[in-house]
Every structure is written in C-alpha cells, then in structure tokens.
Amino acid sequence: MKIVVLDGYTTNPGDLSWDKLKELGDFTVYDRTAPEEIIERAKDADVVLINAVDLTADILKQLPKLKLISLLATGYNNVDMPTAKAQGIAVCNTPSYSTEAVSQHTIALLLELTNHVALHSEAVHNGAWHKCPDDCFCIKPLSLLAGKTLGIVGYGSIGKRVGRIAEALGMTVIPYSKDPKAAIKADVLSLHCPVTPYNRNMINAEFISKMKDGAIFLNTARGGLVDEDALFEALQSGKIAAAGIDVIKTEPPKESESNPLIGAPNCFITPHHAWMPQETRQVLLDYAYKNIQSFTSGDTLNRVDL
C-alpha cells in the first residue's frame, strides 16, 4: 500500500514520529504541496493524508488509484465529496480531537481581553512599574467575568466544553440554539460552529447591531462565519469592545493590508493554531493510523462519506 502525506508540516514539524504509520506501507511525507504538485505526488497513492490541501473534482479525477483520503483534521470541506463518492474513494476525518485545545485557546483569548496580561507584562519590562509611585498600576481596566453572560453559537463538543470552563469562572452560559435572542445580547459571544452555505457571513452588520453594546466577540471556529468588514466597523465604533479570533477568511492572508482585522483596534488575532498543542497533534497521527488500519480491514471508522 502506497501512502502519501501531502501537507504534513503543521501536524508534525519534527517533534513527533511518523514511524507507526510507516508500518502500514510505502510511506512518503511532504511538508507542503502546491496545487500544481498534487497530481504528480499522489498519482500512485492508495491512501492520501491531508490537512488543508484542496482535493478538487478535477484533481480527484486524475487520481484513479486513490482508495482512501484520511484527513488530519475534523473538517472535510477541502475535499470534493460528490466526486470522491462517485469514484469510490473513502473519506475519513478525525472528529473531536481538538476539543480541549480549542476550548483552552478560546478561554485564553477571553482572559487576554479581560486581563490584558501581555500589555501589562510589556509595560513592567519596559520600566513602568519602576517609575510608578504606587505599589500597583493599571494601564487598561481589568474586567471580571464572574456574573457575566456567555453566548455560544455552536453547542457541540467544543462549545459545551467552553461553556463548562466559563461556568467555572462564574459566567452564565446561553447556547444560541436554545435562546438566540438572549445569546446575541450576552456580554461575550463565542463561535464554535462549522461554516455552511446557510451561515456564511452570519456575523454581519445586522447581527452585530443586535448584540449588546460593548460586548466581546470570540471566533475560534471558521473565518467564513464573519463579515470581516462589518466586524472591523464594529470595533472601530466601539459597538464591539474587543475581539479575539484564531481564524480569518483567507489563511494565510496574502498581505497584512488584505484583511481589515489585521491592525484593527482591540483585536487579538492568532494564526489558526488553537488546535496545535503537541499532545493534540499526536492524537491526529494516532487516528490517521487507526483510520487506515480500519479501512484495510473493511471497517468504517470515522468515515464521513457513508
């Protein structure tokens, strides 16, 4: 069996081992693969492992030997599913592998926005405390989370986990699916749903106009959920006090100026790495092994094309 990993670097930049997967067959890893390189690299593969590489209908039609696509991710919107099904190519993903990591990152963004840890640490290192006449100082007001409300859009495994952590901090959690009006009016609104044709750009000017004035906005789900120009305007006006996001529409941005949120006031952006703790990436490799092993034995572990 010939197995090819087309974009292995983000999953394993060198701190993990591919050895277990190598036991399954002729194994090749490419750190990155440009669109024009996919067919040449995967043309003889029985199994392809991908994270973010796009396997379009045109590309899949030129891979007649391919039997299995196993995603080093949960989402599979980068695979043309109708074509894969038509060609008899099985598709597997890795569900729920990042629940703890993304939940932790969501709360990290929230705490940064309420406690301004980086801002005050930098000030101390730059001598501000030394010059302070008092035993303490505050450049930007801190905000207490206990007693505040958290609206959660997308109440799956990650949304529920974020909710449990928030409740431990004394917050009241309001799932959007149970009470949309109350969730929109929450002190903090956090996104944890997949992007679909029905909810793309759901966080638009109209939606934002219904939010509580001065709310905090969090997005560790997908950039396509947000009208980025509308969010920028809301941050500019103060309608949204602050935003913490790990995802944008075009990743990576073609240049800093191409995305209105880069450089926006009170907007913390991390580079879509909420899922990336070493422990979490090891789970991806473990499940890739299990997915391939299951497929070769005739089972359907983590199949998304059934």
Image (cartoon, grey):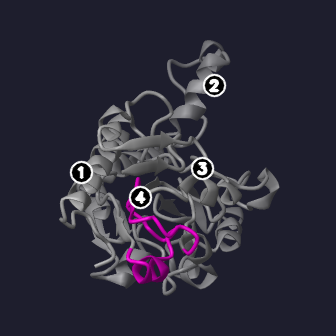
99 w.r.t. 122: above or below: below
Q: Quadrant of residue 40?
A: bottom right
Q: Main secondary structure of the magenta part?
A: loop
Q: Give the residue type that dot 1 points to.
A: Lys
Label 2: state its secondary structure. Answer: helix
Instruction: Kindly indicate whether the residue at mark 3 contacts the one at mark 4 (C-beta within 8 angstroms).
Output: no
| Marks 4 and 1, the one that precedes in the sequence | 4
Q: CA distance from mark 4 to mark 3?
A: 38 Å
| Marks 2 and 1, the one that precedes in the sequence | 2
| Marks 4 and 3, the one that precedes in the sequence | 4
Please give the residue where the numbered disc 1 appears in the rendered image.
290
Please identify, in this view, whether the residue under mark 2 or under mark 4 is nearer the observer: 4
Q: CA distance from mark 2 to mark 1?
A: 49 Å
Q: Residue 244: image x %, image y %?
A: 53, 53
The reply to whether the magenta stretch includes residue 77 is yes
Label 1: state its secondary structure. Answer: helix
Q: Quadrant of residue 250?
A: bottom right
Image disc number at residue 123: 2
Residue extending furthest top?
A: 130
Label 4: state its secondary structure. Answer: loop
Please identify, in this view, whether the residue under mark 4 or under mark 1 is nearer the observer: 4
Please give the residue where the numbered disc 4 appears in the rendered image.
46
Please give the residue where the numbered disc 3 appears in the rendered image.
269
Q: Residue 232: image x %, image y %?
A: 69, 65
Q: CA distance from mark 3 to mark 1?
A: 34 Å
Q: Give the residue type that dot 3 points to.
A: Ile
Q: Residue 86: image x %, image y %?
A: 43, 83
Q: Give the residue type that dot 2 points to.
A: Ala
